[in-house]
Image: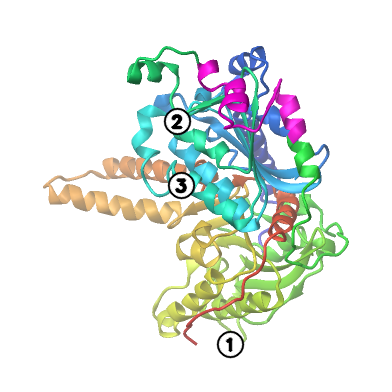
Amino acid sequence: MANSKSDGNGEQLVLLLKTLHSKASKVMEGGGPKKTDEQHQKGKLTARERITYLLDKKSPSIEVGLFAGDGMYAEQGGCPSGGVVVVIGFVAGRQCVVVANDATVKAGAWFPITAKKNLRAQEIAMENRLPIVYLVDSAGVFLPMQDEIFPDKEHFGRQFRNNAQMSAMGIIQIAAIMGSCVAGGAYLPIMSDEAMIVDKTGSIFLAGSYLVKAAIGEEIDNETLGGATTHCEISGVTDNKFPNDQACLDYIRDLFAKFGQPTLAGFNRVDAKSPAKKIKDVYAALPSDRTKPYDMQEIIDGLIDGSEFQEYKSSYGKTLICGTARIEGWSIGIVANQRKVVKTKKGEMQMGGVIYSDAADKAARFIMNCNQRKIPLLFLQDVSGFMVGSKAEHGGIIKDGAKMVNAMANSTVPKFTIIVGNSYGAGNYAMCGKAYDPRLIYAWPTAQIAVMSGAAAAKTLLQIRISALKAQGKQITKEEEEKLLSEITDRYNDQLSPYYAAARLWVDGIIDPAETRSIIAMGIEAANHGQVEKFNVGVIQT
């Protein structure tokens, strides 16, 4: 194992966390202090203020998609946090999802990433059967990008389809119109179980006063057209009006206090214990040089209750660690990439972070056992991929890898994924990447996500570029080749960043390792509101 004390990784991770906290603070400002002041001058709370007011004080909560849109839409002035805030928290003791449009960001207009984030919020509510609250304050689709938001299956319209299906599933949906709510977006609150509106600041209509005049020549102001009095006393579109944001949010809290109890899945939980290892030991366990080996068991011990781990097949398939433990009292099955070099009983040396046939076979069996026993699964990723070469191919690596992917993909117990380090290629898939429906997926600041490592990809892309130039009859000097390699490497490394992934919602966020336990615990508590379907692995090669 690498000497973590001498390689200075603890200090490096502290610097990464400092960057994380700085970026997070900036994103949380939304459209900035000036836009926040404008909200306050209208008598309105900001999106984050509304959520803070609504949620139970001193109760746990986690944010989903904080860095959505990070570094994107520069020509349009950016879209911090995708222009919408999504939090899983508690209202009157009931766990729920809260979605709040951020009117300080382009008046809450929908960018493509906004639609993706809203759909992610609904997905979480649907998978976990959690109530969802929509705090609506949006100018509608961002028109200059309407072709990327409006017509496709996973675009703007999908949320209304989800509205309808969630209602049929018995999932509680509560909406509050606290600002603009126009055009197609007007259907979201009205397709909810109950829709409130704030007087004088909330309005809802399919077309605003300017469009009405242009379309049919009628002159009317927005308040008369679609304000609180109109819709609570004339049209009956909304159910109740309130003098301000606080009164409206108080009403929602009172609604939640009267909900009946949900039917629980029954995942096992006992009193929680703190890990025997301290979080600083987890920081120190990760080498600053990501190519160096380390013992993933040290990471696991810093995350689980009492650092007590019951390992499965500890002497077999050792490049994957499998076993059961508890996190904040919840029973959980863990599948983790071992990053140190291991030696098999036959004397073969196996590289850490690589999935071999024996490890894939073990993991498949362990995943099936967890489904049999109704134990949620946690995947800790630091994976370079599956083993390659003639020996691996002759040994059936594709067959064994497919078996693991099959068991993981068909798993019906809730799955959670934390990307600790590398997340490359098919290894990302086998270890429950985003495509395999983890209930929550978060990355540490040390994560990298791509088809392959930066060095390998850059050299491959360079050869493709050189071949293309030669095909055009052009020659390239050694100096030009080195410059080109540097440009390709820099561009590819930007795409490896966890912030690049978080901006596109490939992960739900980037977290301090110290937050991992609380996020997994909140995730299992949410999943406990749903039911576990019968597990069927289908046809697998043996």
Q: Which of marks 3 and 1 is nearer the N terminus?
A: 3
> Can you identify the residue that label 1 sits on?
346
Q: Does the magenta stretch include residue 393?
A: no
Residue 100 lies in quadrant: top right
Residue 24 vs 172, above or below: the answer is above
> Can you identify the residue that label 2 sits on?
183
Residues under labels 3 and 2: Cα distance?
15 Å
Is residue 74 in sight in this rendering?
A: yes
Question: Image quadrant for the N terminus?
Answer: bottom right
Residue shown at the point (45%, 35%) measured from the top left: 184
Residue shown at the point (77%, 58%) measured from the top left: 302
**Magenta-drawn segment:** 222-251
Name the residue type under label 3.
Arg
Q: In the rendering, at what x and y percent does residue 236 appear? A: 59, 31
Q: In the rendering, at what x and y percent does residue 456 appear? A: 40, 56
* Res. 158 mark: 3
Side of 100 relative to 154 (left or right): right
Classify mark 3: residues with Cα within 10 Å, few (<14), some (14-19) or many (20+): some
User: Element type at marker 3?
Assistant: helix
Residue shown at the point (40%, 38%) measured from the top left: 149
How is the model colour-coded? rainbow
Residue 249 vs 489, above or below: the answer is above
Classify mark 1: residues with Cα within 10 Å, few (<14), some (14-19) or many (20+): few
Name the residue type under label 1.
Lys
Residues under labels 3 and 1: Cα distance?
54 Å
